[in-house]
Amino acid sequence: MRGPKTAAGFTLLELLVAMTVLGVLTGLLATGLSFGARIWEREQTQLEQWAELQMVQDVIRRTVGEAWPLSVPSETGTPRAAFVGSSTSMAFLGPPPAQSLAGGIYHYRLLSRTGLQGVRLVLTWGLRNPDRTQPKSRRGRTTLIRREQSGDDKEVILVDKVVNAEFSYFGVGDDDERPRWWSSWENAAKLPSLVRMHIEFPPGDRRKWPDLVVAPAITAAPDQG
């Protein structure tokens, strides 16, 4: 007698189950790969933003750190430091930028500018014109550096789309004995000892800006003010 025949291969039900399991595994794998790719892209973008902000801080640290303690005339006849700072901008004199081939004294201006997309941190610079650097009265104070913008001035946006960018200055005021932080530095006899920059980003923005503190130069080339 012949025994019962053994069925070869898979039944239709087994094949359907296998295809269903394979489809689920493939979907999970695709979802995992897509999620990993998004995480990788986000982290790469954040690293690039951090690297960009680090370069911006290096530029500011170098530019403000090289501010020359030159003096300019004032309405009272007493020379004052060629440095004017407020909570939203600062202007000073310094050496030529690294990429410049022309020598001389350059005027720099670092300011927060409000636009349609928020606040921008902007740096402008140009070759100083001695004939245009004259004292200018404003509300009883003397502004020692007039904005000398011309067609030859350069401008670059350092940081874009921020909520706020503020400057403060540490040093001894003309009538104070102890140094402290000031929201402005105008009509002073010397440069501030420290300059601090604070930037706030919009909610949800993952960029980080630790407060940047820079010490301007305390020595420089002979006074050419």
Image (spheres, grey):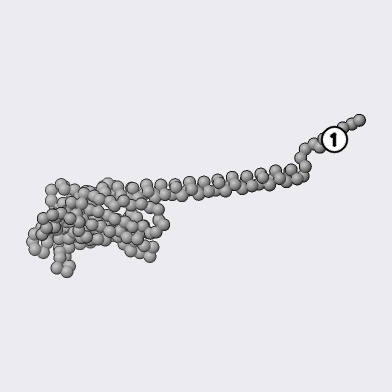
Outermost residue on the left side: it is 77
At label 1, the amino acid type is Lys
Label count reads: 1
**Residue 129 seen anywhere in this rendered image of the structure:** no
Outermost residue on the right side: it is 1
Query: Quadrant where the C terminus lies?
Result: bottom left
- Where residue 19 sits in the image (x, y, percent)? 69, 45
- Residue labelled with disc 1: 5
**Residue 141 seen anywhere in this rendered image of the structure:** yes
Residue at the spot 40% in from the left edge and 53% down from the top edge: 206
- Where residue 25 sits in the image (x, y, percent)? 62, 45
Q: Secondary structure at mark 1?
A: loop
Residue at the spot 19% in from the left edge and 48% down from the top edge: 217
- Observer-nearest residue: 3 or 204? 3
Residue at the spot 50% in from the left edge and 49% down from the top edge: 38
- Where residue 186 sits in the image (x, y, percent)? 17, 60
Q: Which quarter of the figure has residue 15? A: top right
Outermost residue on the bottom side: it is 139
Q: Which quarter of the figure has residue 161? A: bottom left
**Does 97 sit above or below residue 143?**
above
Residue at the spot 81% in from the left edge and 37% down from the top edge: 7
